[in-house]
Amino acid sequence: MFGSGVILKSRVVGPMDCLHYLLNLPLSVLINGIHNKQILDQKDFTAANAPMNQTEVAQLISKSRYAAAEGKYELFKTTSHFDTTARHPELAGFGKHTSPEVSS
């Protein structure tokens, strides 16, 4: 959910900021890593489950603006770190060291 913790390295937002924002989005599925009832019952998680208002969203976006500007913490956009196909082209039906052929 937090990009393997990469975004947290910015030290601009914390895990609960991220969770609160994600739970505020209109998602049909969110895999959040809650693997036991103790985590679910935490006071912080309950607070994160409350909808954010427009001011709270704006404050969070403003707080993270400079860290997000360079893409340094968004490896899914700037690297192939999260791209399984780039690391294992054979899973997409391509040879290990070949590129897909482009048809015209």
Image (tube, rainbow, N blue to C red):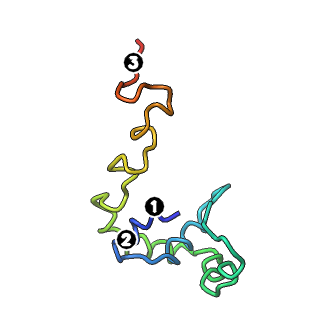
- Residue plotted at (56% across, 74% down): 20
Tally the numbered discs: 3
Return the residue at label 3: 102
State which tag comes first along the sequence, 2 or 3: 2
> Helix, strand or loop at disc 2?
helix
Left or right of 45? Residue 78 is left
> Helix, strand or loop at disc 3?
loop
Task: Mark 2 vs mark 3: give the one in front.
Answer: 3
Which amino acid, mark 2? Ser
User: How many angstroms separate mark 2 from mark 3 (CA)?
Assistant: 39 Å
- Residue plotted at (39% across, 65% down): 6
- Closer-to-camera residue (40/65): 40
User: How many angstroms separate mark 1 from mark 2 (CA)?
Assistant: 15 Å
State which tag comes first along the sequence, 3 or 1: 1
x, y percent for residue 75:
36, 55
Residue 64 — which label?
Answer: 2
x, y percent for residue 53:
57, 75
Return the residue at label 1: 3
- Quarter that holds the C terminus: top left
Which amino acid, mark 1? Gly
User: How many angstroms separate mark 3 from mark 1 (CA)?
Assistant: 31 Å
Left or right of 91? Residue 49 is right
State which tag comes first along the sequence, 1 or 2: 1
> Which of the 4 quarters of the picture holds residue 37?
bottom right
x, y percent for residue 90:
46, 31
- Closer-to-camera residue (20/72): 72
